């Protein structure tokens, strides 16, 4: 009788751990809200709702990507990171957003070290 209880509780515990790990993997990376929102305005990628889920739309080219529901937020982060490496420059206490012809579009002030660390880890700049 105790072997059956141990087996049942072991299986329940195993499924619980697997569920928690899969949820952690599915959540996107933490972002510093103020600076990410300010930069996101100039990013060419946005999410578009559709009946089957979410689509990533490139506003410049009109190309749509349709990754699976589990991958859509991770793919959006990858596209934003690629765009950020080409179009973002940190100079002193400002993030400079560059256009396609390397002209300065806008400067955003970096308020804290957390924001600077976020720019370094997320965008690689």
Image (tube, helix red, strand yellow):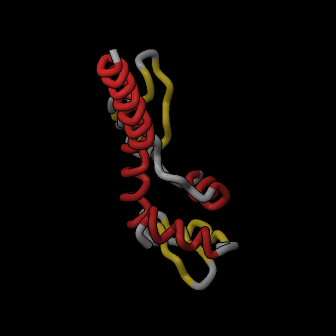
Is residue 26 found left or right of 35 in the rendered image? left
Please state the horizontal and vertical placement of residue 87, each as a whole percent of the image.
44, 66
Q: In this rendering, does residue 66 appear at all?
A: no
The residue lying furthest to the right in this view is 111
Residue 51 vs 124, above or below: the answer is above
The residue closer to the viewer here, 113 or 41, is 113
Residue at position x 51%, y 68% in the image: 119
The residue lying furthest to the front in this view is 1
Residue at position x 55%, y 82% in the image: 91
The residue closer to the viewer here, 1 or 123, is 1
Is residue 3 found left or right of 80 in the rendered image? left
Please state the horizontal and vertical placement of residue 115, each as a whole percent of the image.
60, 68
Please state the horizontal and vertical placement of residue 33, each as a whole percent of the image.
64, 55
Residue at position x 33%, y 14% in the image: 1
Q: How many marks?
A: 0
Choose top left, top right, bottom left or bottom right for residue 14.
top left
């Amino acid at each position: 009788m105790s072997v059956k209880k141990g087996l049942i509780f072991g299986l329940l515990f195993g499924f619980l751990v697997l569920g928690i790990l899969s949820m952690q993997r599915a959540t996107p990376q933490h972002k510093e809200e103020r600076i990410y929102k300010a930069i996101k305005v100039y990013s060419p990628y946005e999410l578009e709702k559709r009946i089957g889920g979410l689509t990533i739309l490139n506003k410049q080219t009109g190309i749509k990507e349709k990754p699976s529901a589990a991958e859509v937020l991770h793919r959006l982060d990858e596209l934003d990171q690629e765009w950020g490496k080409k179009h973002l420059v940190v100079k002193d206490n400002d993030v400079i957003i560059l256009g396609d012809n390397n002209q300065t579009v806008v400067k955003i002030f970096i308020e804290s070290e957390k924001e600077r660390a976020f720019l370094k880890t997320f965008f690689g700049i």
